[in-house]
Image: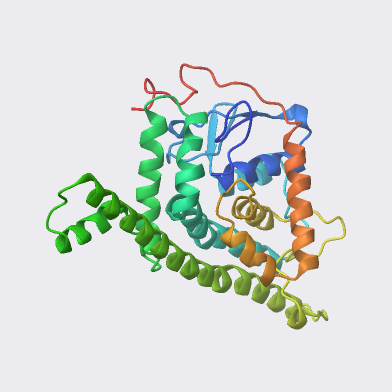
Amino acid sequence: MELHVWGNKDEFAIIDPESIASIWLLNELLDKSNFTVVPSSNNKLSPTGKLPVLLQNGQVIDGYQNIVQYLATTQGLSLDSELTPQEQAFNQSLTIFAQTELSLITNYSLYLNKENYEKYTRGIFSHYLAFPLQYNTPISLRSLAKTKCLEIGLIVEDKSDLEEDMLKSIPTISSKIRKMKNDQMIEYKLLMKNSKTNFKCLNYVQSNLIDFLNGLRTELNNSNKTKTNIDNAIEILPIFQKSDKVFSSGELLILAYLNTLLSPKLPDQFINDYIKVSVDSTNLQFITKEIQRLNEGLKSVSTRKPKFWGESANILNSF
């Protein structure tokens, strides 16, 4: 079987946590000789226009959740087979939680945070896509992220928005010096507004990541009548205590999103810094160690370059 994901010959892209989670999933369930990863960055391979896409025997399975279900029902391969019916329900809620709440937080961090977008996300597409897709794609994804984040109150203003407001109070720009001062004022205001929105995002991280996962663990442990010390320490993962320490499919997806949000590649570490002081240090060390372990496994997976015709993302097959 072949798994198409975001990335290139040098790396798998952290901009798409579901792609990373799907590679981790196959790595946990299959021998490396039984699957190949193709970093094609071509979402046109998917009927829904999203990667990852698993191809096997003429079948096209797109999206992490569908891949999890396909492997369980047709191959008998699952990370969730030992879960009780109640735990299965909790695990399903984890997957939905990741694809909704964590997706919003990740979209904000990658596309709407000014520093991350300008110094990392926008430029990284040049490594994954051919001209002119490398320019159009981040703009399109940023616009989509802006619309989604607006629904939860994370409002981000562009330079053009501020410029229009400032020009109302500055009738004309009569010299280069005045224009330069105007640009500096706009840049300063953008930074200030970005900082305020970052703070709103951190509030969202607290209530829709940390509190949710901690509460879910508490509810599950209480229902199982297991004594915990959760009241004294915020522990967010793992939710399910298993002897072999293998994560469930839902936990694996959450780890993939955390892999992006906590990535040292992002110039603005505001989410990473917040989680460091908000989550129990022992629990955070465990999470970091497991992410490193899973990422280490990526180095030895079998890969191949996408074929130019039909597989690679380029102007010829993007319409």
Nearest to the observer: residue 240 or residue 13? 13
Quarter of the image with the N terminus in it? top right
Kindly tell me whether residue 103 is visible in this rendering.
Answer: yes
**Nearer to us in this view, 242 or 74:** 242
Hey, which residue is sitting farthest left in the picture? Answer: 171
Q: Position of residue 183 (x, y in %)?
A: 30, 51
- Camera sees residue 89: no
Instruction: Describe residue 28's horizontal placement relative to residue 210 as left or right.
Output: right
Say which quarter of the image contains residue 23.
top right
Q: What colour scheme was applied to this rendering of the protein?
A: rainbow
Q: Residue at x 34, y 54 (%)?
A: 184
Q: Residue at x 51, y 43 (%)?
A: 120
Residue 263: % across, % down? 63, 50
Residue at x 37%, y 23% (from the top left corner): 315
Q: How many numbered marks, from 0 up?
A: 0
Residue 247 at x, y percent in the picture: 75, 55
Indicate whether 105 appears above or below 46. Answer: below
Q: Is residue 130 left or right of 209 when viewed as pictured?
A: left
The residue lying at 62 percent from left, 47 percent from top is: 69
| Residue lying furthest right | 243
Between 217 and 178, the one lying in front of the other is 178
Q: Quadrant of the C terminus?
A: top left
Picture quadrant of residue 237: bottom right
Q: Is residue 183 above or below residue 23?
A: below
Q: Quadrant of residue 15?
A: top right
Front-lying residue, 102 or 132: 132
The percent coordinates of residue 33 (x first, y second) are 76, 27
